[in-house]
Amino acid sequence: MSHGYSPAWRKLTIVILRPLLFGLLKRDWRGRRNVPGEGGVIIAANHISESDPLALAHFVYKAGRYPVFLAKSTLFDVPLVRTVLRGTGQIPVYRDREDAAAVLRDAERALLDGECLMFYPEGSCTRDPELWPMSGQTGVARMALKTGAKVVPVASWGAHELLPYRKGERTGLAGRLKKGFRPFPRKTMRVNAGPPVDLSRYAGEPLTKETLRAATDDIMTAIAGLLGELRGAEPPAERYDHHRVLEERRAQVPGARPAGDAADDTAAERTTGRGAAS
């Protein structure tokens, strides 16, 4: 079964959204030629704001591809939204653990059908106080190694000024951002796409935890390096690990549940990395 969509719906979303995005954001785009013009490809990006999926989608469209996200299944419960998401070929992510395999299956099918899949390997907006990428989840690496799809690392910067993440840290740069939607003055969305990550040394290897972690680290290192170029700063040597931070905080609270029992990521998000905003 192929990954289905309606060309008419895709054209309609472009007609509606492009003028809005041009009016809302200024652009500083680099590396669009690194996005392959055809064939299944994974775009692996950092995630700093709930508004960056639209800006990233605009970048990918101008590079000649139509973006396909993994969207939370609850969005498909809204009739009109469901029609648009299904019509444009977006992929639902379900909360139930047993449905995580179906999400991977749908994503793999889309890649084999030549789609451009958008992933946030961190699984959520970064909680790093300085907005650097967190440790990545291994789903993107697994999918790339299983299907042979290229992974194009992409870094973005600027969406956090338009709409800061509401659950972000209250320290560092994240703590200094003014909360809420702030369209004025007009913000600049900076996007930097690098060449596909070289995962050839993992080809043919069993998809063990160690292999997937190493491949994921290569992907996150590439994303962080591109973000460093945009920010004119050196990425931290050690990436922020949100789950470890939660464990450390809960360890200080008597009777608190382990972070693994209370984490807010869905099973599919932990498996694949999130592909769309909340």
Image (cartoon, helix red, strand yellow):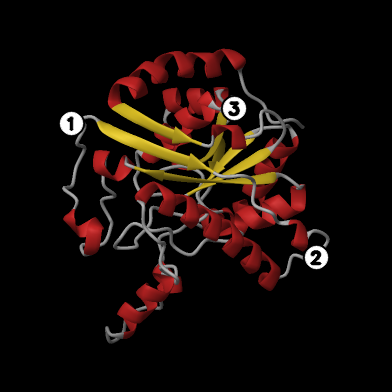
Q: Earlier in the sequence, mark 2 or mark 3?
A: 3
Please state if 101 lies on the left or on the right of 274 as rendered. right
Q: Position of residue 6 (x, y in %)?
A: 61, 18
In the rendered image, the vertical position of residue 31 relative to residue 22, given as above or below: below
Badge number at residue 185: 1
Q: Position of residue 55 (x, y in %)?
A: 40, 33
| Mark 1 or mark 2, whichever is nearer to me | 1
Q: Nearer the viewer, residue 200 or 250?
A: 200
- The answer to whether the residue labelled 2 contacts the one labelled 3, judged by CB atoms less than 8 Å apart, is no
Identify which residue is drawn at 64% across, 52% down: 197
Q: Residue furthest front?
A: 232
> Which quadrant of the view contains residue 79?
top left
Badge number at residue 65: 3
Identify which residue is drawn at 49% across, 23% down: 84
> Which residue type does callout 1 highlight?
Pro
Identify which residue is drawn at 26% across, 38% down: 162
Please state if 252 lies on the left or on the right of 28 as rendered. left
Please state if 273 lies on the left or on the right of 240 as rendered. right
- Is there any visible trace of residue 97 in the rendered image? no
Q: Position of residue 161 (x, y in %)?
A: 25, 42
Q: Residue furthest right?
A: 204
The quadrant of the picture occupied by the C terminus is top left
Q: Nearer the viewer, residue 50 or 262?
A: 50
Report, in whole angstroms, how far the alpha carbon at label 1 lies from the one at label 3: 30 Å
Badge number at residue 205: 2
Q: Which class describes the residues within 10 Å of circle 3: few (<14), some (14-19), or many (20+)?
A: many
Q: Position of residue 237 (x, y in %)?
A: 45, 70
> Which residue type does callout 2 highlight?
Glu
Q: Earlier in the sequence, mark 1 or mark 3?
A: 3
